[in-house]
Amino acid sequence: MTDITTAKTAPETMELATFVTTDIAGITRGRSFDAAQTDEYLRKGVGWVPANLALTPFDVIADPNPWGSSGDLRLMADPNSKARVTCLPGVSPLHFYHSDITDLKGEAWDCCVRSFLKRTLEEYEKVGLKVVAAVEQEFQLLGVDWPHAPSFGLRAQRRADPFAPLLMQALREAGAEPETFLPEYGKDQFEITCSPSPALEAADRGITIRAITKEVAALFGWNASFAPKTQPDGVGNGVHLHFSFTDLAGTPVTFDASRPGRISQTAGAFAAGVIRHLPALIAFTAPSVLSYLRLVPHHWSAAYTCFGERNREATLRICPTLDLPGRDPSRQMNMEYRAVDACASPHLSLAVVLKAGLEGIKAGLQDPPLISSDPSELSEADQERLGVRRLPASLPEALDRLVQDEVVTGWFSEDFLDCYLAMKRKEIELVDGLNADELCARYAAIY
Ligand code: GLU
Ligand code: MG
């Protein structure tokens, strides 16, 4: 462990910059070079390997996969996504760029999830909409040695000092625009929120926040774990995706005071598309074996095809607006998709929820019924009447539901789907036979 009060990086230490890609296992990987040569690398990218996409979280490549040992790709960095942190004591600057995966001619690879999100956002622009998003994340500090402190408590935060201010400073320096840091309900659990931004940047930011949080925690000798559960009977770590829309001129179009839930017709149709395809989307947004220990009723997570207003058991929730004088609700109105966790790619998760929503917008679907109570407590008749169904309860079930939804599978190339399914089936095999405690430990060591 670094002694963060005394350690110094030698002034002559070379600074590295890294081009990163965050893959379908939600893991950020990449290649580094002398930061002084960044301009040259921004022009030419760094090398990458197709079969890397078949990597399970456990560093085993699913075999067969569509590529095997053949093929070459590039990581082409987005210069606008630069994150550079110099304020951390004892380590060299953390300096990286989110990248698209391209072929050797610089064309987007059909399996690049960041490019998939970009294409999805272009489809929104074609129907006159821009997407604003934010990724809100919970995590737990593992390896800490301190007395219990109450949930949401000031003590819970100060116990970890100077973790929170150092983290907030590092996030701000990286351009991640952190908003609030809060001690959460679970044991040693915290949450970070950040400002809304264009959706591509929001996905990049979600990853940047995770990477920096892990880095800062490691300086204290802790593991900041974003795993969906770190103990079978503990509180889950959620990732919540927030969405709102503007027209191409930037005028908000999510709010309509005259309609149920005060959401616009566009937002209602979006919600209907998401709820319709939800059982298939889950395979991407809750993509690990462990994810299904979190997605259970009474966990404030997401267990049903349920659209709710201010309802934390709803999978898609209309968030409250602050109705103080001078605060325009049309600029605040947003919806939150709650069935995500850190085992998922933020780019892929945002993209599939947006694609499903776009199906609803294009078909002009009616808003789903708004449910304000816990969906697990509705009678069977009410569930039936309101279209409330239990979401897949395991990863194999979620993969089956994905394969059955031809609209959703139709969004992807054959190679991508083959790779995704092969990787997930290998992941299932690799944790087969582990009990719940072992499963939590296995994933908490990675996420
Ligand atoms: N910890 C909950 C989850 O697993 C979320 C709690 C909240 O609403 O912030 O998603
Ligand atoms: Mg929370």
Image (cartoon, rainbow, N blue to C red):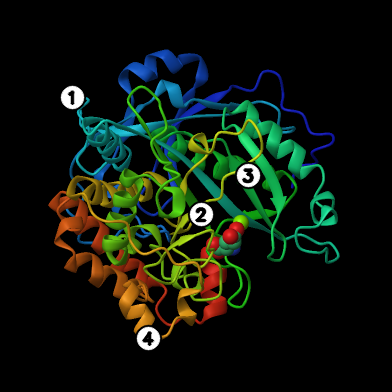
Label 2 is placed on what type of residue?
Val
Label 4 is placed on what type of residue?
Glu
Image location of residue 343, percent across then percent down: 45, 57
Relative horizontal placement of residue 262, taking residue 360 as reference (left or right): right
Please identify, in this view, whether the residue under mark 3 or under mark 1 is nearer the observer: 3
Q: Residue at x 43, y 41 (%)?
A: 255
Q: CA distance from mark 2 to mark 4?
A: 29 Å
Mark 2 nearby-residue class (10 Å; few <14, some 14–19, many ≥20): many
First in residue order: circle 3 vs circle 1: 1
> Which numbered disc covers residue 380?
4
Please identify, in this view, whether the residue under mark 4 or under mark 1 is nearer the observer: 4
Nearer-the-camera pick, 280 or 22: 280
Tell me the residue that label 1 is attached to: 105
Q: Residue at x 26, y 47 (%)?
A: 355
- Secondary structure category for the residue under label 4: helix
Relative horizontal placement of residue 345, taking residue 44 as reference (left or right): right
